Image: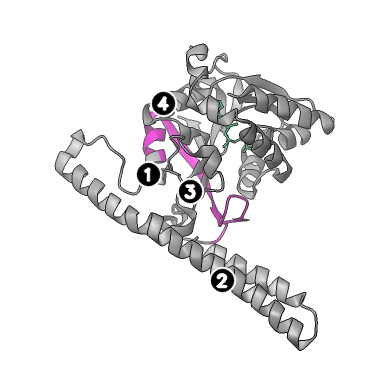
Amino acid sequence: MFQALADDILKNKFSSSESIRFYSAAVTKGLADIERQVFDKYLKKEGRCLLLGCGAGREVIPLVGAGFEVVGLDLVEGLIFSANKLAEKKGIKLQLLVGDMRCLMFKDNTFDTVIFAAGIIQLLSQKQKIEVLTEAKNLLRKNGSIILCVDNNNYYFAFPYSFWPLFELVLKMKWKIRKINKGPARQIKQVSKVLFRPFVQSYFLIIFNILTIYFPSFFIDLIRGLKKRIMGKFYKGFEPGQRFIRKSFLVELLSGLPITFYRFKDVKKDIKESNMRLVDYMTTWGSYWGIDNNLPLPNFLKIRSPWITYVLKDF
Ligand SMILES: C[S@@+](CC[C@H](N)C(=O)[O-])C[C@H]1O[C@@H](n2cnc3c(N)ncnc32)[C@H](O)[C@@H]1O
């Protein structure tokens, strides 16, 4: 079974040398705020954890370094090799396996936590998502949890999260203006450089996004909604509002992968179908490595967050 799956598009994409370089470099970033927050709350020091899609070790290296017992699994041998090498440099010994989350071969009741690393569940079809979640549930010991790290929404158009890049820009400019040297001619040149360049960039980005994402999406959703209404339960296409991730900093790396945003209501539906319950979810204000969102936002805004980390348990 593993052999049959191993040769597919996912493996090819993630085993390219570009991907290995990218995920190895990501290791220096370490855990994102949202991950740190959820791991602090739900990982047990005395427990055993399985991390699916460990890549080159961005999460597993700091977790093992902090004394957690974590088994990392990834589809790509090159990434596992890189993770072992990076950990060795830090004097950390990892337990890593090459394998496929679509056919997990562990005994039932062997882990206290199963983590689906950033975005990986979104690489699966809906049927596979439910199969994999159900299998992960079987691996859990009593009172164990599943942690799902999910791309929920388009960052630039998830109001009010979309304000964050502009706010960040203003902060950056303030910091740069403080560093400007004295002297009028130099000052004018530098101020225009600081003020003008980022604004041109962000206006361009906003207009580009409106033309390429927002505007077409509006019509695509309208057509999907109409089709769904007409075809009723026979409609098998994408839901209105569901997006393929085409544009991201991983454009080259991910283009062609069947990854979609996995939206709150779909996650909730799949959790129910896998016979589990949602016990907690954490959202993030801004980007994945952004600031924690403990703001007292109402739920309907929280669930629009670009990233959501879910915690699930068995009944
Ligand atoms: C978005 S990357 C994240 C890597 C790492 N967690 C990080 O954040 O740096 C997704 C990872 O999942 C792995 N992956 C994709 N499909 C998989 C599957 N079916 N089974 C196991 N790993 C998979 C890829 O090889 C890749 O390393």
Q: Which mark is residue 157?
A: none
Q: CA distance from mark 1 to mark 3?
A: 23 Å
Of labels 1 and 3, the one closer to you: 3
Determine if the magenta segment contains residue 274.
yes
Residue at the location (55% across, 70% down)? 200
Q: Which residue is mark 1?
A: 265
The verdict on label 1 being within 8 Å of ligand 1 is no
- How far apart, in angstroms, are the residues tagged by discs 2 and 1? 35 Å
Q: Quick one: label 2 or label 1, which is nearer the N terminus?
A: 2
Q: Are the two marked residues, 3 and 4, in contact with CB atoms closer than 8 angstroms? A: no
- Mark 4 or mark 2, which has the lower sequence index? 4
Q: Amino acid at mark 2?
A: Phe
Residue 199 is marked as 2
Specify the label residue 247 is tagged with. Answer: 3
Which range of residues does the magenta coloring cover?
Answer: 267-295
Reading the image, the residue beneath label 4 is 128
Q: Earlier in the sequence, mark 1 or mark 4?
A: 4
